[in-house]
Image (spheres, rainbow, N blue to C red):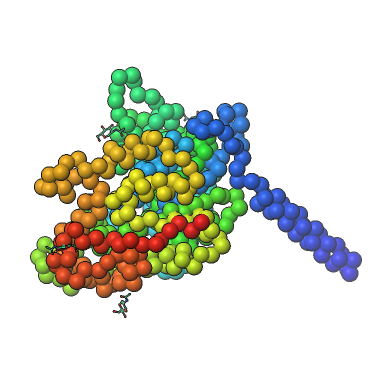
Amino acid sequence: MQCSWKVVLLLVLASLAIQYTAIRTLSSKPATMCRVAKHTGCAPTVAASCQPSSHILILATTRSGSSFIGQLLNQHPDIFYLFEPLYHVQTTLINSSLRSRPPSAPSSPAARRLLLGAYRDLLRSLFHCHLSELETFIKPTPQQHRTQRLFRRGASKALCSPPVCPPLPPGVGGIAGGTTGGEWCVRRCGALNLTLASRVCSRRLHIAIKTVRIPELADLRPLLEDPRLNLKVVQLVRDPRGILSSRMDTFPDSFRSWNMWRNSGRRPRNLDPSHLTATCQDFLNSVSTGLARPSWLKGRYMLLRYEDLAREPEHKAREMYRFLGLDMDPSVLRWILNNTRSSGTSAKHKFGTVRDSAATAQSWRLKLSFHMVQLVQNLCNITLSQLGYRMVNSPQELTNLSLNLAQHTNLLPFL
Ligand SMILES: *[C@@H]1O[C@H](CO)[C@@H](O)[C@H](O)[C@H]1NC(C)=O
Ligand SMILES: *[C@@H]1O[C@H](CO)[C@@H](O)[C@H](O)[C@H]1NC(C)=O
Ligand SMILES: *[C@@H]1O[C@H](CO)[C@@H](O)[C@H](O)[C@H]1NC(C)=O
Ligand SMILES: *[C@@H]1O[C@H](CO)[C@@H](O)[C@H](O)[C@H]1NC(C)=O
Ligand SMILES: *[C@@H]1O[C@H](CO)[C@@H](O)[C@H](O)[C@H]1NC(C)=O
């Protein structure tokens, strides 16, 4: 009897030792497996062991200009870019019958944790180019690893150009990866072969994913500490007053009472500001985490304000690329020049054009009433001051566009 007890203990200890060694070997494996020349990616023969050597996450919130910053990465030929893949997880795991609403976190803490866990698992797989992990979440379920339904596929240049998509016939123009639309990509390229897309992903040097579904920076800690990832996070924040105005325009059904307030001047009773307080709280939590400079963030976190990006797109893009340790490709510069320069000096058209990014970032000042702005300033006062956004004290200050509300800040990348 005594003897078998000892044998069992010995076996347990031995298996623990084996597991420990296995985990050590796994985690000490370098993240960089393929180091090859720019643009060429990995040679086809070693493709099986290839992976992007750096992983980039754009942490943003709905209507904060995240499509814009995503495009700055999407245009780079060494980067494989995915736009909001977590959409599929959310629609599968929580019943979101209201598609037009901005994504909201589930109310119970347990559900929130489960969802976050699922988000992180998927991100981890995608950073390793295992795009097939998406299949359990896509409806209808992909057949033979092919799907017509990848959310906003058209926003990803790699998924709309050869070899994932057949080449354009000679003489036909067209450029992949605009900030809008994307239907054309599915129409022209047909079903997406996820096996092929994964292979293309593995041969790129970097992978970038944009999401608005992770609430705050600390939620990413397990990924930032994962030794098999080399993750850098660029967090994009925006003035909550601008976020409100943009959400009202983009989701008119969910923001009906806000729009009624704007149009009638009378504040409705059933106004629900919880989406704003949640966004401001999330910003504040992230900034506090960043400012505390924990070791797991060292060299891995950059905070960017949409207003700065809109005012000086080229300068900020260069800053971001420097933080990421990548060269800025000429194609990125071309895209910036083509999409941000004011297309005319006529004041009449100034706010109608999407190309004038600086004016777009300020347009909320002519759309929201002073009372609405006051409400946001009361709800988000600490967040506004932390992020360097100046409050306005009168309707005159609100609409005087020579008054700069995004003041200079010393929010710098944490190196
Ligand atoms: C989702 O919610 C809608 C409306 O609340 C309900 O009709 C539908 O049955 C729900 N679906 C699932 C899968 O729970
Ligand atoms: C998808 O792409 C892979 C890799 O190129 C290929 O082997 C497979 O046959 C393709 N699947 C379909 C259904 O075309
Ligand atoms: C610049 O924008 C125009 C109009 O949107 C587009 O037709 C053209 O292809 C773009 N060029 C580049 C280099 O992005
Ligand atoms: C924010 O508002 C609260 C309550 O109205 C006030 O106590 C606090 O001083 C304000 N903070 C800032 C930074 O303005
Ligand atoms: C607008 O703000 C600028 C800068 O503070 C100021 O010089 C100017 O007098 C203001 N204009 C009006 C009409 O209030």
Q: Is residue 122 visible?
A: no
Judge whether residue 333 can be spotted in this image. yes
The image shows residue 5, relative to residue 140, as above or below, that is below
Residue at position x 35%, y 38% from top? 333
Kindly identify the residue that appears in the image at 16 percent across and 61 percent down: 400
How many numbered badges does the structure rendering display? 0
**Ligand 5 falls in quadrant:** bottom left
Where's the N terminus, which quadrant?
Answer: bottom right
- Residue appearing at x 32%, y 41% in the figure: 336
Is 171 drawn above or below residue 183 in the view shown? above
Image location (x, y in percent) of residue 192: 41, 35
The residue drawn where x is 54% and y is 41% is: 52
Is residue 212 or residue 318 the one in the foreground?
318
Residue 411 percent coordinates (x, y):
40, 61
Say which of 39 and 333 sits in front.
Answer: 333
Return the x and y of residue 314 as percentages of the image width and height.
34, 45
Q: Position of residue 74 (x, y in %)?
A: 39, 40
> Going by the picture, which residue comes out furthest to the top?
170
